[in-house]
Image: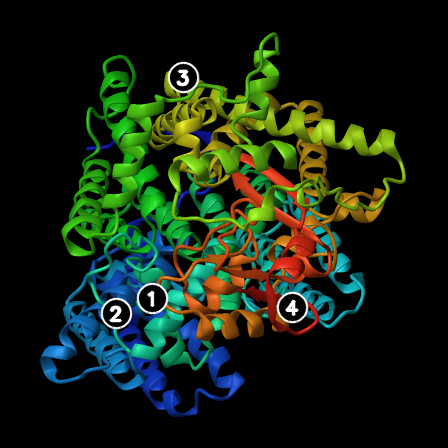
């Protein structure tokens, strides 16, 4: 049995006793069941009307709340536990949506339904699942009722949600060619709201603080996800194509050999279910609804931190995540991780939640773990590694600190995730074999490739700070290396005879960047942000170590410290090993680790602040300044204030914009090429020109080396807006970035221009 030690941080947020909750909840048991049944009826009645945006606005929250509330009741999860961590509700709804959608998809063909992923079968499956869960909860305990009435003053709590609407308006105005004024207002208001929340957190209601965190994160995510004519980001182009194919065929097949994206229900079955039941378009599900789910992650951090920190420092832990705007830019580009990260956070909370009865806790943990497995393979792999490290660490620490030898719920989370991953990615979908085999071969051939960016005589500290980030090489060196590689390993590629003449030699391209207005301030802010970011990691690790070894901390605090130590170890290995960094993106690993790393950091800050007012004021000021510096430098605010490059959320130019902003003409040309190319023909497109091709056609085997000496003489070459208008070509070669002048002269001299719309072109011979 887990024993929790009393501390000021935990006692300040203590939930009412079970008996007290039970006396208030008992009269409402029947009314709650009737309310949930009425909500399910309402979903069915609104389905024929879901072409209306007002109905869609009502159906999406219903689909993300009612199934989860019903499941939690059926599992006998106490209402006070749900009230203290409300993320359980949408995560449980995701579990039900995944389960019912998968059941309909698999059972439909046996019942004569050739396209089960359609509105009527999906509605029947969801309603039947929820009704069975309602029936199972009829005789449940009184304390299983969720105290919805505790969410008082909903209008007073909802005002921060105007911020995402302003951000959405700013993105749409930028898409229409207008200036960035509205988008800049939303971005500035986000940091102002976070800073105000941190300053006055001790006076504000915890529900309002949670809404502030959610609103700020959603505003940031929508500022990126709503840019362009399709989707924003790299991975999401493939995810969109997989979803589109699922909608066209009306069925998802378990056999997905070598296709890790297609095997994820979070990008196939679940968004299809949300689309057909709510009426929201598939594109809007990825651009609007999924970011609304992903924005729950900092709220989950806040709820987790509240179990060991006071309100102010719990808010600081979550605000720190929001302030690192790169996370808000990264998440909308990976739809499957948006869902999986929230499930991961709920999994951590559930496996450490001693307020939930054991059997209910184990069942909830198992379901959340399986849902995570079905949503994202990489998030699952990292979760398995962290739990695998945490279990022996806890056993070791238990010999000299007060903590159980084994927390059964943690073991259940580990076993469920591991077994679920082995089965789902293996014999069920056959989706992970090629990737894992390739990683094993790379490790065997290259080893761990420690600090691949180190140079003789260089500083190890500088190399570590740089990590395994992509380093640039010249266009000439890239052309020579890739030509030699093709000659040795791709003899089927036959370049044209004049491809090697000097006039067609690949040349470096200089990226235009807005001038910096104040170089000293610009450099100082960037340096401050680098120091602050490294201090976040270092102090978070120190805080975790102190929590583990400190005598007077609660058991849950020590467990979070152990989980953080496991995360720090994993992050260090990825940062030091080029091989592992290539297998799993460092930024995504840090994003997942932030669920606990920011909590242990703020535990240390709370300890340093102590009880003296002058120390509290000093630490709070330091935290606020760090928060603002991180936000300003990670967002486009620095560019807007002092000049320099800006991201797509504030501009219609620049490197980020050229990479990820997809226009309607690019989609049209990509669609044309997809219809024209024959099976087996070679198609060339540089790294980012591939995105509209993948999203619209699903073409595989695209070749990203668009150089005169690597283009086959009978190939197709696709040029996007950046290639045609900006004359830039981009690629990633052996971990090195290359930006070069797109070889338009070579293509025009030797290939036919078979399609053009002014901003994108297709060449063929």
Sequence-wise first label, 4 or 3: 4
Q: Earlier in the sequence, mark 3 or mark 2?
A: 2
Toward the front, the furthest residue is 497
Mark 4 / mark 1, whichever is N-terminal: 4
Marks 4,1: beta carbons within 8 A = no
Q: Nearer the viewer, mark 4 or mark 2?
A: 2
Q: Which residue: 37% across, 20% down?
A: 548
The disc placed on residue 268 is 1
Q: Real-space Cα distance between discs 1 and 2?
A: 7 Å
Q: How far apart are the two marked residues, 4 and 2, measured between alpha carbons?
A: 34 Å
Which element type, helix, strand or loop, lies under badge 3? loop
Mark 4 or mark 1: which is in front?
Answer: 1
Q: How far apart are the alpha carbons under marks 4 and 3?
A: 45 Å
Q: How far apart are marks 3 and 2 (CA)?
A: 51 Å
- Front-lying residue, 708 or 733: 708
> On the image, numbered disc 4 is attached to which residue?
165
Helix, strand or loop under label 1: loop
For marks 4 and 3, give the one nearer the viewer.
4
Q: Is mark 4 on a helix, strand or loop?
A: helix
Residue wearing tag 2? 252
Identify the residue under disc 3.
550
Q: Quick check: marks 4 and 3 in contact, CB under 8 Å?
A: no
Q: Can residue 367 be seen in this view?
A: yes
Q: Residues within 10 Å of mark 3 (few under 14, many from 20)?
A: few
C-alpha gap between disc 4 and disc 1 = 27 Å
**Which mark, residue 144?**
none
Give residue 717's position: percent from left, percent from top.
Answer: 54, 60
Element at label 2: loop
């Amino acid at each position: 049995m887990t024993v929790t030690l009393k501390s000021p941080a935990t006692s300040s947020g203590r939930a009412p006793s079970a008996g007290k909750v039970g006396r208030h909840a008992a009269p409402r048991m029947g009314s709650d069941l009737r309310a949930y049944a009425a909500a399910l009826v309402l979903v069915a009645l609104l389905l024929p009307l879901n072409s209306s945006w007002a109905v869609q606005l009502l159906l999406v929250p219903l689909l993300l709340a009612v199934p989860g509330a019903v499941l939690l009741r059926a599992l006998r999860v106490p209402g006070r536990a749900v009230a203290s961590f409300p993320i359980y509700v949408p995560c449980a709804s995701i579990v039900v949506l995944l389960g019912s959608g998968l059941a309909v998809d698999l059972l439909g063909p046996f019942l004569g339904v050739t396209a089960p992923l359609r509105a009527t079968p999906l509605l029947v499956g969801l309603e039947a699942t929820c009704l069975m869960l309602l029936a199972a909860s009829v005789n449940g305990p009184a304390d299983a009722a969720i105290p919805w009435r505790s969410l008082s003053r909903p209008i007073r709590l909802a005002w921060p949600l105007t911020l995402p609407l302003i951000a959405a308006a700013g993105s749409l105005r930028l898409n229409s060619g207008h200036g960035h004024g509205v988008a800049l207002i939303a971005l500035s208001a986000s940091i102002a709201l976070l800073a105000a929340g941190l300053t006055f957190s001790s006076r504000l209601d915890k529900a309002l603080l949670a809404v502030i965190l959610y609103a700020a994160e959603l505003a940031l995510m929508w500022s990126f996800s709503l840019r362009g004519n399709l989707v924003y980001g790299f991975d999401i182009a493939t995810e969109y194509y997989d979803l589109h194919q699922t909608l066209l065929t009306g069925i998802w097949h378990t056999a997905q050999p070598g296709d890790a994206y297609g095997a994820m229900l979070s990008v196939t079955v679940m968004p299809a279910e949300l689309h057909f039941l709510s009426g929201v378009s598939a594109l809007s599900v990825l651009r609007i609804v999924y970011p609304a789910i992903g924005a729950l992650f900092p709220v989950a951090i806040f709820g987790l931190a509240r179990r060991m920190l006071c309100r102010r420092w719990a808010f600081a832990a979550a605000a720190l995540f929001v302030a690192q705007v790169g996370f808000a830019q990264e998440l909308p580009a990976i739809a499957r991780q948006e869902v999986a990260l929230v499930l991961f956070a709920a999994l951590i909370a559930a496996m450490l939640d001693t307020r939930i009865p054991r059997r209910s806790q184990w069942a909830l943990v198992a379901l959340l773990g399986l849902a995570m497995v079905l949503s994202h393979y990489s998030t699952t792999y990292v979760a398995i590694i962290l739990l695998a490290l945490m279990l022996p660490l806890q056993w070791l620490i238990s010999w000299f600190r007060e903590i159980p030898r084994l927390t059964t719920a943690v073991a259940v989370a580990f076993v469920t995730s591991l077994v679920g991953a082995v089965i789902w990615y293996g014999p069920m979908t056959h989706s992970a074999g090629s990737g894992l085999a390739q990683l094993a071969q790379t490790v065997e051939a290259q080893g761990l490739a420690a600090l691949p960016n180190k140079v003789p005589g260089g500083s190890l500290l500088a190399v570590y700070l740089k990590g395994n980030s992509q380093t640039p090489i010249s266009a000439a060196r890239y052309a020579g290396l890739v030509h030699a590689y093709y000659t040795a390993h791709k003899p089927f590629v036959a370049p044209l005879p004049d491809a090697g003449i000097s006039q067609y030699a690949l040349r470096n391209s200089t990226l235009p960047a807005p001038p910096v207005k104040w170089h000293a301030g610009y450099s100082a802010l960037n340096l401050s942000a680098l120091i602050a970011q490294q201090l976040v990691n270092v102090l978070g690790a120190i805080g975790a170590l102190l929590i583990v070894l400190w005598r007077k901390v609660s058991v849950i605090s020590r467990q979070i410290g152990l989980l953080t130590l496991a995360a720090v170890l994993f992050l260090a290995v990825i940062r030091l090993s080029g091989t592992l960094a290539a297998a799993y993106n460092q930024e995504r690993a840090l994003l997942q680790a932030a669920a606990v790393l920011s909590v242990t950091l703020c535990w240390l800050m709370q300890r340093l602040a102590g009880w003296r007012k002058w120390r509290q004021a000093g630490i709070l000021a330091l935290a606020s300044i760090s928060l603002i510096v991180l936000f300003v430098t990670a967002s486009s605010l620095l560019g807007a204030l002092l000049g320099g490059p800006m991201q797509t959320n504030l501009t219609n130019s620049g490197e980020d914009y050229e990479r990820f902003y997809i226009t309607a003409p690019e989609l049209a040309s990509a669609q044309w090429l997809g219809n024209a190319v024959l099976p087996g023909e070679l198609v060339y497109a540089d790294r980012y020109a591939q995105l509209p091709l993948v999203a619209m056609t699903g073409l595989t085997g695209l070749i990203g080396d668009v150089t005169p000496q690597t283009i086959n003489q009978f190939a197709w070459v696709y040029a996007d807006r950046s290639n045609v208008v900006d004359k830039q070509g981009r690629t990633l070669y052996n971990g090195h970035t290359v930006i070069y002048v797109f070889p338009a002269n070579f293509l025009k001299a030797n290939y036919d221009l078979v399609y053009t719309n002014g901003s994108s072109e297709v060449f063929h011979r």
